[in-house]
Image (spheres, grey):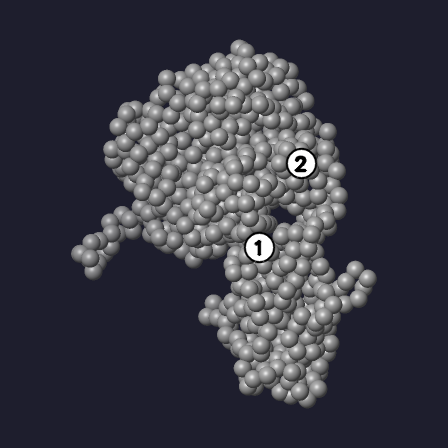
Amino acid sequence: AVEDWFLPDGGSSESPAYALMTMGGIDGFGLMFRGYSDPAGYAGPDAKRFDDFDACRDTRYGDCWQSLIWTLQGNLRHPPSADSYRTTSIGASFAELIAVGYPSDEHLALLKELAGPDLAGGSAEQALLYREPGLEAREVPPFALPDVVFPFLAQGYLRTGATGRDSLALLNASDWGGHHHLDSLDFYYWKDGRELLSDLGYLWDHPDSYQTRRTFSHNLVLIDGADQRGAERGGSFHLFSVTPRVKVMEASSRAYADAEVFRRTCVQIDHGEGGSYLLDIFRVKGGRERQYVFHGPATDFQVEGLSPEAATAAEKQVPFAVRLHCGAVGEVYVDDAEVRRVMADGSEGPNLAENSSLATGDVGKPPPGWGLYSGDGKADSGVFEPGRDDLRCVRFRALAPHENGRMNAALLIGASDGYTGREALPGVLGATYRVRFWLRGNAPKVTVGAVLWPNDPSSAADRAHLNMLEVTPAGEWTQYQAEVTLPSNALPLTNIRQASGKQPWHITWPLAEDYQFAAFVPGNNDETVLIGDGWGQRDHRNTDRGATLPYVVRSRQGGGLDAFVSVFAGAPTGKLPVTGVRLLDVPANAPEGTVAVEVTTPTGVDVIVSMLTPQPLTVQTPLGPLTTDGALGAVLGSGTTPQSACLVGGTRLEVGEARLSSNKASPQGTVQSVGSAPGESWFVLDAPLPEGCVGQTLFVEDAQERRAYPIRAISGTKVYTKQGNVGVEAREAERWEFPMTLAWEAP
């Protein structure tokens, strides 16, 4: 389990929820095999024996628990990324076992957080059998969470607060795998106990689970409205640097095969008592249309700087089908189906559905113009007689579940297999269709909806689903009717409003307990902004069925490199740390994709410059001319006077009194060897790192990816990525790089 199912850095190969399920299946082994030795004279089939074997220390079991702890947010729950719930957490029972196997201050502090300072809220059974007497009296520092990036999990976690528990900014560059979502470079922001930029999480084995897995349901960029690919998407971090005021992480992936650039830079600026905010720069090159998408945390919001109006567009043809889904074994009979467009005057257009009563061909054969979807389990459909009027109808049978226990099949009105829709019903985006049909049967429930292909009917990744109604079949023929409106553009949104995004604007959500969240956008001449209502359900038990959230979509056309710039901030009402944002002009010879941003705060101006291919340049700013050659340069101002500065991956940053310099921007070389010992692991480099690198990040490259390793200690050319059983195992690599990180504070 720990050597193969978990990733080499201890991260979950699927999601936190499934990692904890796995831990629940092996927790006894970590307790049983501590100080275990084989009987005297015994040797196993491989002629080897165990002597004083400790499963907690002699395997990567501890790395797996470490990863689960370090991926918590401040309320000690895991972010609901991939197939994890909002409620996923380690829990006091597991914390008891962790404290037994690894009795460090950190783990006891975690147990005290979960079980109470006196540990009375822990697991009574495990406390009785395993807990050391008097453990509750041991004094430990408050439980804290680190800023951390994982080399194989490929997720970066930036935090604020003295213990790292006030906020969490999570950038996800994980590769594809089981129980993952189509969400590479998704961004999640939790602060002050609230999800501000949320991940919708996990709908379990729900028929609509695709709604939360799809790319559009995440905070990222879509290319040509299509889902990301899964296989071969990879994911690598390029920057991960931490200073007292400025923290940055940058990652890329191959989520779209044809994208030349798909890269995200996230900068956290912390003004201490003045609050913190996030600058997001998402660069994309490829495709015809790029759409930066994020959804807000609540339905109540105010927009300033935009004048959204109801979107109107020329009719766009789109294939679709009506989907009658069965999630359990049963059979239904369907007759006299109608799918008619509702015209502007209330009249109805011609019936798009094939008439099953007049179906030709042999009884039992698939009906022409209809389709069968079988995701899991065994199902069939065919012409059947007699129908409702002693003619013919269509029979659909969900015959047997898959070996995984799931029954997931559907009858489709429209020639489609549910995956592609080249021959499905001819529809129009924005049009409303009235659906009628007669039905009888014994299936426990039939969920009726529509599936459409907004851009590419040959691609299963391009599907969008819309709900219509749920019915409980009876033994007698019963007629049902419903309506569905196909989205007014290629996006699965309703109530769409549109505006030009040329000028700076911001959107604010007032939240409970006098709190607010805001997104600031500097504006772009080529940008169109859409705001609409999209999928918001998060509970697989349907307690929030029909919930929607406002989605913001910033669209640009063309083939060049786009850099979407945004600033996100949350704070008590009236105390937002940001009041505005604008783009600064960069020199004409600046590298492609260079971004210079001015953020206005209640007390001054901050300036951030980001480059993909750093080279010297000077930007005119309210703080004065700023000269830098770094991958990232940030200067925080009081009024127009620099107070703090940060330089990452550069040799020079100068503005006013702020001065930072380094002999090299990013020292690099060859990895000489990789080594491990009990509780330790390291890289041996061909040259020593500069002073002051502990706590920063070493980047190494193997044959597949660039990987980021937090530095635990340094001894000469030996760089420890694990020491004292804390950290991750160094793995084979060929080359290394260390982007220099420098900070300055005004005297």
* Residue drawn at 51 percent across, 28 percent down: 594
Distance from Cα at disc 1 to Cα at disc 2: 24 Å
Give the answer, above or below, for where 34 lies relative to 374: above
Q: Amino acid at mark 1?
A: Asn
Secondary element at image label 2: loop
Residue drawn at 72 percent across, 45 percent down: 497
* 198 lies above or below 700: below
Kindly identify the amino acid type of the residue bearing the numbered disc 2: Gly
The image position of residue 686, as x and y in percent, is: 26, 28
Which secondary structure, mark 1?
loop
Which residue has dot 2 on it?
Answer: 501
Residue located beneath label 1 in the image? 455
* 495 relative position to 653: left or right: right
The reply to whether residue 299 is visible in this rendering is no
Report if residue 625 is visible in the image: yes
Residue sitting nearer the eye, 333 or 593:
593
Image coordinates for residue 662, horizontal then vertical, percent: 40, 17
